[in-house]
Image: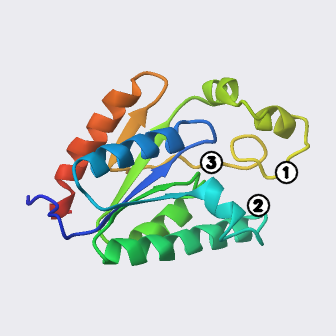
């Protein structure tokens, strides 16, 4: 298996519940990669909803369109040699299968964390609002999250440190070139 070289792009897709640690982990992994001199693009689903997808809601069709837009951005960046980190809930397996089918050197990273822990981490109170019915289609409460069945990597943010999880990602990335 060969290693990912300096000119090849790749996409690391972080999926998991709201509050699982996708953004925190992707941000730290991006920082480590930049320190190594790699070209990195980080696409965060929540941030892109404010700009690229501000016209969309949270229906299944709107969620799919949001992911489709992120996939196209990731494809462009990876095609020019960047390592692209995407942190987005991406609740349905079909969405992640679509991303996998379109993106080069795709690595699905399941950021696994129990729902109870995600709720405890929720400083915005979104889970509480969803449980009261104030936020419809909220992943993990009133809408499904389908855990990956064959992710290339699973990290457990409630069991391991951020440093440990990022080290696991760096090890997995080293072998992605042969993927």
- Residue 46's spot in the image, x, y percent? 64, 54
| First along the sequence among labels 2 and 1 | 2
* Residue found at the far left of this picture: 1
User: Does 112 appear above or below 29?
Assistant: above
Residue drawn at x 79%, y 45% is 142
Quickly name the residue at label 1: 136
Work out how far the residue at label 2 is from the one at label 1, CA to CA, in angstroms: 8 Å
Q: Nearer the viewer, mark 2 or mark 3?
A: 2
Quickly name the residue at label 2: 58
Quickly name the residue at label 3: 145
Kindly state the secondary structure of the residue where label 2 is placed: loop
Query: Which quadrant of the view contains residue 84?
Result: bottom left
Choose between 41 and 106: the one closer to the eye: 41
Query: Which quadrant of the view contains residue 101?
Result: bottom left
Residue drawn at x 29%, y 49% is 33
Label 1 near label 2: C-beta < 8 Å?
yes
Q: Nearer the viewer, mark 3 or mark 1?
A: 1
Residue drawn at x 24%, y 51% is 173
Q: How is the image coloured?
A: rainbow
């Amino acid at each position: 298996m060969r290693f990912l070289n300096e000119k090849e792009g790749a996409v690391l897709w972080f999926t998991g519940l709201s509050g699982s640690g996708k953004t925190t982990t992707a941000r730290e992994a991006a920082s480590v990669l930049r320190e190594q001199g790699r070209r990195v693009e980080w696409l965060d689903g929540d941030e892109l909803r404010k700009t690229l997808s501000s016209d969309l809601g949270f229906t299944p069709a709107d969620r799919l369109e949001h992911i489709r837009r992120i996939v196209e951005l990731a494809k462009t960046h990876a095609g020019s040699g960047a390592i692209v980190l995407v942190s987005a809930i991406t609740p349905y397996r079909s969405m992640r299968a679509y991303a996998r089918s379109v993106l080069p050197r795709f690595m699905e990273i399941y950021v696994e964390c129990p729902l109870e822990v995600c709720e405890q981490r929720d400083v915005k109170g979104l889970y509480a609002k969803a449980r009261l019915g104030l936020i419809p289609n909220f992943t993990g409460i009133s809408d499904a999250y389908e855990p990956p069945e064959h992710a290339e990597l699973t990290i457990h943010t409630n069991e391991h440190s951020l440093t440990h999880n990022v080290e696991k990602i760096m090890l997995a990335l080293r072998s992605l070139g042969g993927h």
